[in-house]
């Protein structure tokens, strides 16, 4: 599976899972920078209309994305976040992803 196909599958899975609650998906890390290696994971933030209960949302994400992870052979590392907290740059990781990230 090529990267564009992978990103499309991730995005369509998230749209099906969250519907209107999904406010965006931001790819960050080595895949976004273009320096990924064969061992790199796919880091992305899932921007949701809040409130976001991290553990609950992470469980939902991992369950929904597992078929893509298995088929692609790539480790997927989603981070569910409140879209408003992301836009406000509440945490350093959010600001970093906003600077280097790519919207899917």
Image (cartoon, grey):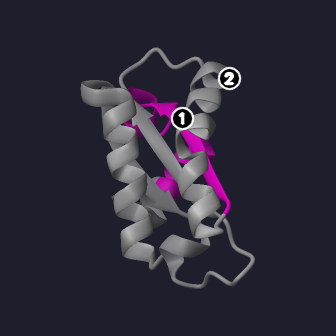
Residue with the mark numbered 2: 55
Q: Residues within 10 Å of mark 1 (few under 14, many from 20)?
A: many
Residue 49 picture quarter:
top left
Callout count: 2
Q: Nearer the viewer, residue 99 or 22?
A: 22
Point out residue 44 in the picture as x, y percentages from the top left corner: 52, 53
Q: Is residue 23 above or below residue 49?
A: below
Q: Is residue 91 above or below residue 39?
A: above
Residue with the mark numbered 1: 80
Split into 4 quadrants, where in the image is the C terminus?
Answer: bottom left
Task: Specify whether 21 is left or right of 81.
Answer: left
Which of the two discs, 1 and 2, labels the residue nearer the N terminus?
2
Q: Is residue 77 above or below residue 42?
A: above
Q: Is residue 86 magenta?
A: yes
Q: Which residues are magenta?
A: 75-97
Q: Nearer the viewer, residue 57 or 92?
A: 57
């Amino acid at each position: 599976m090529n990267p564009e196909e992978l990103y499309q599958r991730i995005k369509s899975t998230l749209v099906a899972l969250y519907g209107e609650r999904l406010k965006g998906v931001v790819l960050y890390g080595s895949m976004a920078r273009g320096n990924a290696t064969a061992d790199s994971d796919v880091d992305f933030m899932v921007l949701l209309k809040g409130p976001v209960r991290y553990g609950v949302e992470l469980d939902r994400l991992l369950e929904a994305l597992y078929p893509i992870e298995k088929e692609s052979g790539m480790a997927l590392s989603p981070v569910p976040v409140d879209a408003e907290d992301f836009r406000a740059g509440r945490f350093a990781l959010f600001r970093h992803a906003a600077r280097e990230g790519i919207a899917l």
